[in-house]
Every structure is written in structure tokens, then in C-alpha cells.
Image (cartoon, helix red, strand yellow):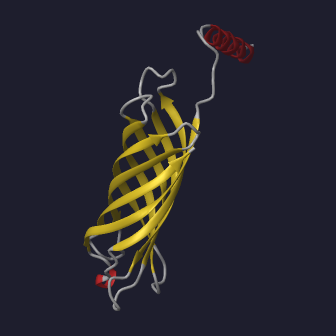
Amino acid sequence: MIKRTYILTFLFLLTMHLAAQDKPLAKAPKQYSFEFGYRNVFAQSNMLNNNKATNGYGMLFDYAWQLSGFDGKKAKSFITVPLGYTVLMADNGFSKSVHMLNYGWTVRHELSRNEKIVPFVGYGLLLNNMRITDVEGSLFGHQTQFDLGVNFNTSTRLKYFAKIEYSYTSYPRFNEPERIRLHYADLRVGVRF
């Protein structure tokens, strides 16, 4: 009897909620992005064996859901799930290249609406896996990033963009009190569709 009462109450509340909707539910628009570019590590501390790899290249793919700006009255915002890979080349013959895989969540806010050129800001929290060539194992850390860029809208479905990005990444070290810390900037270009 109590179970039946709960089910009837749930169905009643669900019906009332759906009837109170002033417009039908719609799927959030999605957006895909692919980007690539240059990375410069401008500060690092406690790197394994004083390894120096400060310049490299990377690429990233992300899948985004639009969160606001559906009616065109407000600027759009997106939440994205990125997956990226970066290679930092060794600075000298004594150092090794560094490979980074990152994934997580980012948020992007467009700062104007319905323009040919739309500036945006973004921020993200990502997980980051770092491997150093010829070193057994890998390190798992976190990455915090901020970016500033512009979208170039076209008459087609494609949107080109350019951005500059700052990131801070931190990795633990076994049996060591100090973490490995990297600060770097990326200059990236890409396309959204």
C-alpha cells in the first residue's frame, strides 16, 4: 500500500512538472572543436633529473554542450570535455622529451553575440599524465588552465578560432616532499563545428 502511494505521488508530481513547462524540452546544442599549436614551459621546479624540455607542440579535441544563449539574446556559454596530447622536445643532449596526455572539464564563455568576431574566455580543471622518454612509468597530476581567444564566425557551419592559454600543472613525487610544478603558455588555432 505504501509503495503504491509513493508511485502515485511520484507520477502526479512528474505530470505536474511536465505540464508546468512553458515550452517543450529540447536537447542542448553540441559543438566539436579541434585545435593544435605551440607550447612554451616558462617556469618549472623539481623536474626529475633536472630534465629540460621547454618547447613543444600539441593538439586537443573537445566535445561541448551549450549551456546558455539559446535564444540569441545572451552570449553563449559551453561546458566541454577535452582530450589532448602534447610533446615537449628536449632542450639539449642530456635531457629527454616529455609527453603529456590531458583530459577533464573546461568552461568557455563567449563575450558577445551574433558577431563575425566573438571574443571568449575559458577555464578548466584537467587530469594530466606525464611520461618522460626512457624513464619507466608515468606521473599523474592535475592541470588548471585559463584561456583568452577569439572565434571567427563564417557563413558555413565552421568557426575558426585562435587563443592564448596559461596552465599550471602539478605532479607528486614518491618519497619527496616537493611536487613537480610546471607553468606554461600555449598559442593555439583551431576549428569548431
Question: Outermost residue toward the front?
Answer: 155
Say whether residue 109 is left or right of residue 79. left
x then y, percent, for residue 55: 35, 73
Identify the image quadrant of residue 90: bottom left
> Is residue 92 toward the left or the right of residue 68 in the image?
left
Residue at 40% over, 35% down = 110
Question: Measured from the top left, where is residue 71 in percent x and y?
Answer: 51, 20
At which x and y percent is residue 57? 43, 69
Pinpoint residue 187: horizontal percent, then vertical percent: 36, 59
Looking at this view, is 11 or 146 the one in front?
A: 146
> Of 139 and 76, which appears nearest the observer?
76
Residue located at (40% from left, 51% from top): 162
Q: Nearer the viewer, residue 152 or 44?
A: 152
Q: Nearer the viewer, residue 160 or 96?
A: 160
Above or below for 174 versus 183 = below
Placement of 137 over or under 102, stated as above or below: below
Taking the spot 44% from the left edge, 20% from the top edge, the residue there is: 73
The C terminus sits in image quarter: top right
